[in-house]
Amino acid sequence: MSRPSLERDYELLFACFQFPWQAIYLNRLKGWRKRCRKTACFLAESWTTMLADSPQYFRILAEMDIVFTHSEVSATALSRLLGKQCYCLPFGVDTERFSPRHPPAARSIDLCSIGRTSPGVHQELLQLSSEEDFFYHFDTAQSFSVRDYREHRIMLSELLKRSRFCLTYKHNLNITHRTGGDEALSPRFFEAAAAGAVLLGVPPDCQEYRDCFDWEDAVIPFPYEPGEVKDILRRLNSQPDRLMSASRANMTHSLTRHDWAQRWATVLSATDIPPKPALFSRLGQLARRAEYHWAPA
């Protein structure tokens, strides 16, 4: 990687790292501490197992004014390591991209499963799709790369906007070796909710989930073990008013609370930097879209 040098002063350096080891890139940016009045970063995956295995990467962040991580348990552990207060910043979503258009497209996909799934539940859903008029969309590839990540995000949003249900299972159902047992929210919860799909699954047992998804039927319980899939879906499909209310609530709460604009407002507040007019403009646009989704049909 090249060694760019900052040639002028900046109000804020904000760094996003998918993994903690990427913090070493800061060492390649000459003058970042002297040239930036405030500095902050966000760690998208920061499990306590990573802190135990590779603390040297996290210590690079000690020079940051504010450190955000994806979960409360990670923020607490990182605060102990760095000797300074670190904070949880939940994931967000581009609700402009993920929320349905006006008028919305038909929800022609009955159930969408992307990423984490249950092998047993998957087999039941496959059988249901072969026996009934039930469109089950699911992953058919593993460890694949995408041609263009922007196109991939567009396709994901278009699929979710056309889905009635979306499976949302927490990390600790199948990757405890990686999480070390940490309970945390994943981006899929925010993406599916913003698209207005009804979330089915097992949510994480953590405060940030309870804070972010505190409305009725935000995630409707759906087992990770097979055996009840058909019965649960039939019961839910017999309650169209409940499903419509859940879909609308998911969209409106996402627009007014979980867009990346709201997360950016949190970052600016923490670093004592005044928001720019463009942020207020976007927040206003999101509020107007939320009013549309909450209006009676």
Image: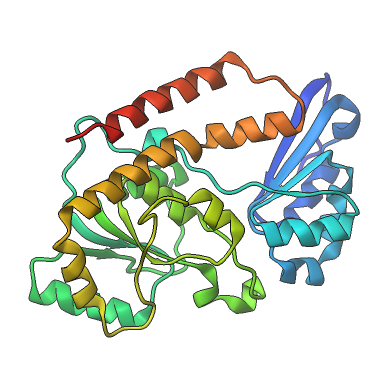
Q: Which residue lies furthest to the top in this view?
A: 277
Counting from the top left corner in percent of width and height, residue 116 is at: 43, 69
Describe residue 97's horizontal placement relative to residue 244 as left or right. Answer: right
Q: Is residue 180 above or below residue 57?
A: below
Counting from the top left corner in percent of width and height, residue 80 is at: 86, 60
Q: Is residue 155 above or below residue 99?
A: below
Q: Residue at 45%, 21% (x, y): give it.
A: 284
Colour setup of the view: rainbow
> Nearest the camera: 130 or 275?
275
Q: In this view, does 114 lie above or below 247?
A: below
On the rendered image, what quadrant is the N terminus found in?
top right
How many numbered marks appear? 0
> Nearest the camera: 149 or 19?
19
> Nearest the camera: 251 or 174?
251
Q: Residue at 70%, 19% (x, y): give it.
A: 274
Counting from the top left corner in percent of width and height, residue 289 is at: 34, 28
Q: Residue at 63%, 73% (x, y): give it.
A: 178
Report if residue 224 is visible in the image: yes
Q: Residue at 37%, 53% (x, y): give it.
A: 216
Describe residue 69's horizontal placement relative to residue 136 as left or right. Answer: right
Counting from the top left corner in percent of width and height, residue 44 is at: 63, 53
On the rendered image, what quadrant is the C terminus found in?
top left
Describe residue 148's horizontal placement relative to residue 242 as left or right. Answer: right
Report which quarter residue 45 is drawn in.
bottom right
Report if residue 162 is visible in the image: no
